[in-house]
Each structure stands twice: as C-alpha cells, then as structure tokens.
Amino acid sequence: MKEFTLSRDESGNWIVTSDKIPGFAAKGKTQQEAIEKMKSAFRMYFPCGECKGE
C-alpha cells in the first residue's frame, strides 16, 4: 500500500503528502528535502519509541 505521494507544485517545489493522514504534508526545494521534512513531522506527530528513526 502506498503511504505517501510526491509531486511538484506550480513553483517547482516538491510536495509530500500522506495518504493515511489527510492534510499532513511537507514541502521542499528538492525531493530529499521534502521527504526529510515529512519524516521529521511524523517523528513529532508520532513520538512513540516504535516510530522513532523510521
């Protein structure tokens, strides 16, 4: 099952959205920056030990 969608906006920025949590998104100038921001947001949103570092 797909959990994230990676796309570009009209400004050329990369957008990562969560397919499981509506409205949960991150933006970056590169794909990697957007993905890292999404990972960081998930770690803050799900601070359980099981979720850390993934």
Image (cartoon, rainbow, N blue to C red):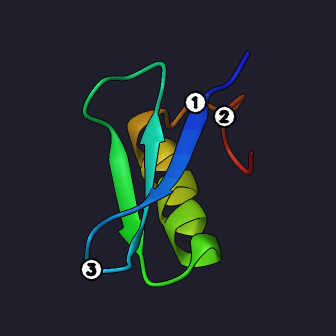
**Which dot marks residue 48?**
1
Residue neighbourhood size for the residue with mark 2, other residues' Cα within 10 Å, grouped as few (<14), some (14–19), many (≥20)? few
**Position of residue 38 measured from the top left corner of the image (x, y, whole percent):** 49, 54
Distance, label 2 to label 1, CA atoms, is 5 Å
Q: What element carries label 1?
A: loop
- Type of the residue with mark 2: Cys
- Which residue is the site of mark 3? 11
**Residue in the image at 38% along x and 23% along y:** 21
Q: Residue sitting at 30 percent across and 24 percent down?
A: 22
For badge 3, the amino acid type reads: Ser
Residue 19 image label: none
Instruction: Point out the residue furthest to the front here.
Output: 10
Which residue carries the number 2 mark?
51
Q: Mark 2 touching mark 1, by CB under 8 A? A: yes
Q: Disc 3 versus disc 2: distance between alpha carbons?
A: 32 Å
Residue at image x 37%, y 66%? 27
The C terminus lies in quadrant: top right
